[in-house]
Image (spheres, rainbow, N blue to C red):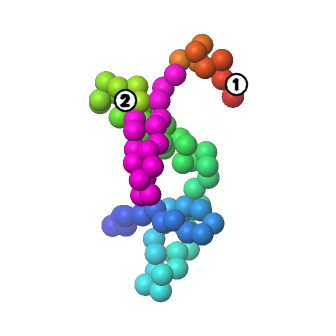
Amino acid sequence: MTQALDIFQQEDGFYVGRKLKNGKLAKGAYKLTGEDIMTMFTQFFEDCCRESGQQKMIMKSGDGQFFVTMKVPAKDAGEAKE
């Protein structure tokens, strides 16, 4: 039987795994890297753009501020370097 994994925010970052009854992360929990998070967000954003037909997404944070993410063609963005 496969056990579901969850994402947890800890003081030192985000982890994928399970929490024990005592609140600690179980052995084998994986700390997500910034690259992991950006890969997931990029795919999420691409899916949202495709579904909505929009090239931007506006999100409201818990403190009431707005965050805007948008797709900009590389030629208009000064040929972003990797």
Q: Position of residue 42 (x, y in %)?
A: 49, 37
Q: Which quadrant would the N terminus be assigned to in this image?
A: bottom left
Q: Residue furthest left?
A: 52
What amino acid type is highlighted by mark number 1? Lys
Which region shows up in magenta?
Answer: 57-72
Q: Is residue 72 left or right of residue 3?
A: right
Question: Which corner quadrant of the image does residue 59 belong to?
Answer: top left
What amino acid type is highlighted by mark number 2? Cys
Query: Is 44 rendered above or below residue 26?
Result: above
Residue 49 is labelled as 2
The residue under label 1 is 81
Q: Residue furthest front?
A: 64
Viewer-proximal residue, 58 or 1? 58
Give the residue displayed 66% in from the left and 17% down from the top: 78
Q: Can residue 44 be spotted in the picture?
A: yes
Give the residue displayed 35% in from the left and 26% down from the top: 54
